[in-house]
Amino acid sequence: MPLTLSTIGDRSPAPARRPSQQALFLRGFLKHPVMVGSVVPSSQRLIRQMLSRVDWAKTKLFVEYGPGVGTFCQPILDRLAPDATLIAIDTNPDFIDHLRDEIRDSRFIAHLGSAADVQAIIAEHGFESADYVLSGLPFSTLPSGVGEAIATATHDVLRPGGAFLVYQFRARVRDFLAPDFKRIDHGFEWWNVPPAHLFWAWKD
């Protein structure tokens, strides 16, 4: 059978499939276990409880550290006002590329960078302060000094009355928050794998 454009085209390889969210999350954990707290994304119950204390009517800028595959991103966007912004900061370029491909919302910005540089990052996008900052970064396994630097940078970037929302599998994260935040509320969510401690650290 003679070769034609159609038969040649039939032999072209199929386009590569993008990895699933679960596969991407697991790959991110295996590549950067120090920066990803779990191999399983957060449960819907944890998300609802963690976001329950946010005053959405007064929120213009919400920042998330370590968004991973975006488990919290859409629930946050669903609650944000039309003129508000969500900036998600991650050091993993695979996660950032995934979020930029998957979330097509003009209120959403995926930024490749470090949470410790949050002040410079939000300034780059035209903001002076944040109303709320959310983090699932595993503070207890971060390199020495990084957790403390992130807590201080977050306190500095928050407006008065704003809060640092942190979910962790160990309660030790309070030790990182206490030097900068004097009022810290604590909760616990059993319906998560593994069960998680929830903290709301307020900037009074």
Image: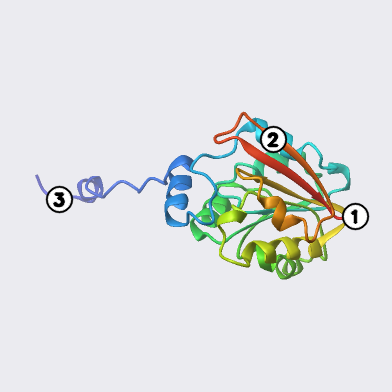
| Above or below: residue 89 compared with residue 14 | below
Residue 65's disc number: none
**Residue 128 appears in which quarter of the rendering?**
bottom right
Residue type at mark 1 is: Asp
Q: Nearer the viewer, mark 2 or mark 3?
A: 2
Residue type at mark 2 is: Phe
Q: Is residue 106 visible?
A: no
Residue 188's disc number: 2
Please identify the quadrant where the C terminus is shown: bottom right
Sooner in the amino-acid sequence: mark 1 or mark 3: 3
Say what secondary structure mark 1 lies in.
Answer: loop
> x, y (%) of residue 50?
72, 39
Q: Is residue 42 left or right of residue 6?
A: right
Residue type at mark 3 is: Leu
> x, y (%) of residue 195?
60, 35
Q: Is residue 172 left or right of residue 12?
A: right
Q: Residue at x 55, y 40 (%)?
A: 41
Question: What residue sits right under mark 1 in the picture?
Answer: 204
Say what secondary structure mark 3 lies in.
Answer: loop
**Residue 121 appears in which quarter of the rendering?**
bottom right
Query: Mark 1 to mark 3: distance in Å?
Result: 74 Å
Query: Mark 2 to mark 3: distance in Å?
Result: 66 Å
Q: Residues within 10 Å of mark 1 (few under 14, many from 20)?
A: few
**Residue 35 appears in which quarter of the rendering?**
bottom right
Sooner in the amino-acid sequence: mark 1 or mark 2: 2
Q: Nearer the viewer, residue 9 or 18?
A: 18
Say what secondary structure mark 2 lies in.
Answer: strand
Q: Is residue 149 visible?
A: yes
Question: What residue sits right under mark 3 in the picture?
Answer: 3
